Amino acid sequence: MLNLSQRLTLQQKLTPQQVQYLQMLQLPVLALEQRIKAELEMNPLLEEVDDMELTQEQEDTALDELPEPTVDGQTEEQTTSDEDDRYTFEDFMNDELEGYKTSQMNYESEERDEFPQPAEVTLAQRLKDQILLLDLTPDERVLCEEIIGNIDEDGYLRRELPLIVQDLNLAQGLSITNERAEEILKLIQRLDPPGIASRNLQECLIVQLEVGDVQPKLKELALSILCEHFEDFTLKHYEELAKDLNLTLDQLKPIIELIQKLNPKPGEGQISVEQNYIIPDFIVERDNGDFIVMLNDRTVPTIRVNRRYKELMMQSSKKTASNGVRKFIRQRFEAAKWFIASINQRRDTMIKVMRAIIEKQHEFFETGENLKPMIYKDIADNIGMDISTISRVVNGKYVQTEYGVFELRYFFSDKLTTFTGEEIANKEVKRMIKEIIEQENPDHPLSDDKIAEMLNKQGLNIARRTVAKYREAMKIPVARLRRKI
């Protein structure tokens, strides 16, 4: 049975302009620069302003004013020139529309690289070049290339060698035995960098010792440790190692140091053109006790609406322009206006958030220490904005201070309460734990229980499991693995 009913609901919707502003707000400085350049390509009403033009424009505010029409609907300059140039608006706009469509299609269909990338020799190519110097048959070279293709980013061969040989023999009709494949693998492992294509850490370290220029006595003892006592070495059972090798701890120390200097990841360290560099979004400087906040937008283009189009808009209302031209001008003008407004609103919001952070963390910006507990809601309440807005500003943004470059999220942390009721940021607790570990006796590292006991004596109400959680977050191993001779 059908029924009719009424229902009153409230819905909150974002306008396209608000969505654009929020999208711009979460962009870091490099992404913002690319976004503006893309918009300059897409919208012919926008133009980039250089520093000289910007200075002149600021001095002469009349340039921003629309031309005043006379009684007949034309400016004084147009009155004398329109008689000789009657095609100006219509023909100009037709040309611009064609150019806009062409540039838009090119922009959407082509991926342009603004900066040419330098050629680089990859690790795989370096290994293949070295294989050419080995005395191998064509079939064996094919196996070498297949092994190199299965090396992971750390330099290890994760796929089983018999499976590689089996696949090659079946797919390409080769007849390579597993024994010969092992011999070829050993040749590859002794190329540069040594230890490449090893199947585990133990094999990687052994190969590096075998090809390394080391004193024979030290090499013999080190190989004995890696081949026969590898588990005791990884667990740092130094007393048992010394007893098995009939050495004192002082005699064992240089052998352990030799092994620890070997490279556990021979595939790492390759320079890539895709490396990321941190570009700070803010620069904070101190001036006579005050902090000056600047947006690092020197590379961001300054844009404005093309003045020529402003004049054409005035002409379009008085001349016989087609509906398509008028609609195109109006749409592009509105898009340009809201785009510029979004950039300005983004700048104001980011400055407000950064100043609020400095106000809350004033002591840190002065001394580089004593970070206070702070959450997004504290900043949102301070500047009267929503928490989601603060999150968009903070995520992926960096600030350059006199104590280093920090991600804005670094200044936000939960709190711990001391026995006196004072609140302290958990990042300060992590710093205290790290300092305690750095000052510990390497022969007898401190356990998590002992670190928690030491922090409790300093007035911090912290449990052992919390110490373990913070230690693991800082990628510090347990006490047993921090032990040194």
Image (cartoon, grey):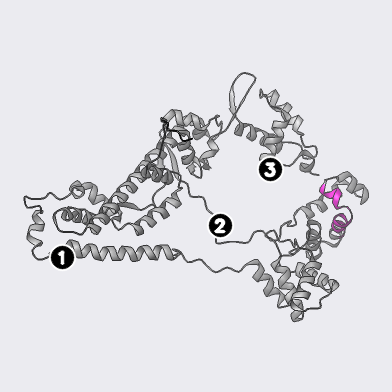
Please tell me which residue is depicted at 62% across the width and 18% down the height of the picture.
420
- Please say whether residue 229 is one of the residues in the magenta stretch: yes
The quadrant where residue 12 appears: top left
Q: Which residues are magenta?
A: 220-234
Most extreme residue toward the bottom is 137
The secondary structure making up most of the magenta span is helix
**Residue 218 percent across, percent down from the top left:** 84, 58
Decide which of tag 2 and tag 3 comes sooner along the chain. Answer: 2
The quadrant where residue 210 appears: bottom right
**Residue 315 percent across, percent down from the top left:** 16, 55
Decide which of tag 1 and tag 2 comes sooner along the chain. Answer: 1
Badge 2 amino acid: Gln
**Residue 112 percent across, percent down from the top left:** 44, 65
In the rendered image, which residue does mark 1 sit on?
87
Alpha carbon separation for disc pair 1 and 2:
53 Å
The vertical placement of 458 against 439, above or below, is above
Alpha carbon separation for disc pair 2 and 3:
23 Å
Which of discs 1 and 2 lies nearer the camera? The answer is 1
Crowd class of label 3 (few under 14; some 14 to 19; many from 20; radius 10 Å): few
In the rendered image, which residue does mark 2 sit on?
275
In the rendered image, which residue does mark 3 sit on?
475
Which of discs 1 and 3 lies nearer the camera? The answer is 1
- The answer to whether residue 297 of the structure is visible from this angle is yes
Crowd class of label 2 (few under 14; some 14 to 19; many from 20; radius 10 Å): few
Q: What kind of element bears circle 3?
A: loop
The vertical placement of 20 against 312, above or below, is above
Q: Is residue 90 left or right of residue 430?
A: left
Quadrant in which the C terminus appears: top right
- Please say whether residue 344 is one of the residues in the magenta stretch: no
